Image: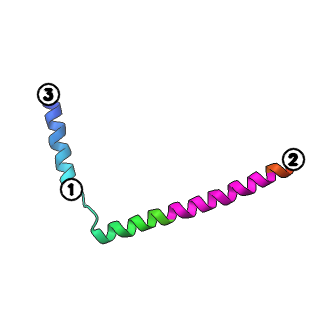
Amino acid sequence: MKKLVQFIKESWMEFKKVRWPSKGELWGLTIAVITASIILAIFTGVIDTIFYRLVHLILP
């Protein structure tokens, strides 16, 4: 039980050290993640379409 209490105290001390992003930083990072996700989805779709057509050319 003593180790659990010590763990919780140390975890709380580390939690206090966390630097939370500002609202502006949060919006910027959110837009970056959404943009990267859309680009990756488009890239994956294009590659999938290319492979689909190649497979259908080889195996009609």
Q: Nearer the viewer, residue 18 or 45?
A: 45
Mark 1 and mark 3: Cα distance apart in space = 25 Å
Q: Which residues are the magenta region? A: 36-54
Callout in the foreground (3, 2)? 2
Type of residue at label 2?
A: Pro
Amino acid under disc 3: Met
Quarter residue 11 falls in? top left
For the image, the number of numbered tags is 3
Which of the two discs, 1 and 2, labels the residue nearer the N terminus? 1
- The residue singled out by tag 1 in the image is 17
What residue did someone put label 3 on? 1
What colouring does the structure picture have?
Answer: rainbow
Residue 28: where, in percent of width, then height?
A: 38, 70
Q: Is residue 20 left or right of residue 55?
A: left
User: Pointer 2: what residue?
Assistant: 60
Residue 48 left/right relative to 1: right
